[in-house]
Image (cartoon, grey):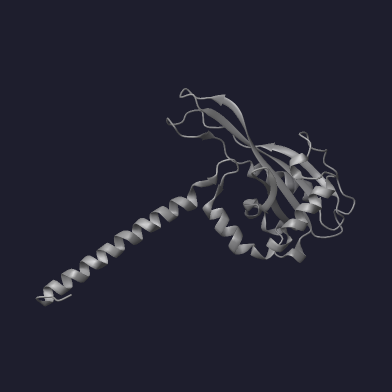
Amino acid sequence: MKFDNKFSRKLYWKSVREYVRFWMILIAFFAGVLLILPLNRDNGTTGFDLLRTNFALGGFKPYIKSYATLVVQANSQSAISDMPEEPAEIIETAAAGNHSRHVFTLKFVDRKGVADYVIDSLYFDLPKRLRATTPDDTDIVVVTRYYKDVVGKYTDGTSAYRRGARVYVADKHSGELIGSTIISGDAPPSVKSHGATGIGSRPDRGIVAYLVKLLEG
């Protein structure tokens, strides 16, 4: 492109910079929205959760299947999806004080009727002292199965949902189920805007409190 004078050249490059800057801001905005908004409304998983788990816990991925199988076998069931509606009572392990209690967390995912397991971002809500840093460092495997129940209706006719989770805790060393429970999250908002989804938060705080009490007393 030819320019008549130096001023025109500066004006051209200024316009190019402003154009590029506009699109960078727009892309960054939508990327931020994708990171914040839940990708899965049933369990509240966000894009940020996926990035964080994949970046920090990628070394655990080859062990996901064996960890999930450990919990399934510990509960004497063929699949997490076949576990009973009411969980077993908490079982205190005799070996509780014999080794460290480093935890790794998985969650059950129903992929069109096929059971699958992925890393649960609940891991990052655990106290650092309880987090397993490597597969060799793992002592406890936790599998959560999130669900949502209809607990009411809004004036626009949409349903109000409350999230919950079935939690299964197995000792990696002994292969025994050391605890299981059902924990509910917060109630859905009492008022919402028309067309929005009325759903409560995940019960992460309750799950963490349950695990701390189970493992540390």
Q: How many marks?
A: 0
Judge by depth and name the residue closer to the eye, 1 or 11.
Answer: 1
Residue furthest toward the top? 155
Instruction: From the top left corner, tell me how far across and down residue 8 is, in percent.
Output: 13, 72
**Residue appearing at x 62%, y 52% in the figure:** 121
Q: Does residue 146 sit above or below 152 in this rendering?
A: below
Residue 110 in the figure: left or right of residue 161 = right
Q: Position of residue 27 (x, y in %)?
A: 38, 58
Q: Residue at x 9, y 75 (%)?
A: 4
Which quarter of the rendering shows the N terminus?
bottom left
Place of residue 96 in the rendered image (x, y in percent of width and height, measured from the top left)? 85, 53
- Position in image of residue 186 (x %, y %): 60, 35
Query: Which residue extends farthest right?
Result: 94
**Which one is nearer the viewer's eye here, 4 or 47?**
4
- In the picture provided, is 173 more to the left or to the right than 203? right
Up/down of 152 relative to 12, above or below: above
Q: Is residue 204 above or below residue 58?
A: above
| Residue 137 visible in rendering | yes
Residue 187 seen = no
Query: Residue 5 sits in which quadrant?
Result: bottom left
Q: Nearer the viewer, residue 167 or 217?
A: 167
State the residue at coordinates (78%, 46%): 214
- For the view shown, which residue lies furthest in the left direction? 4
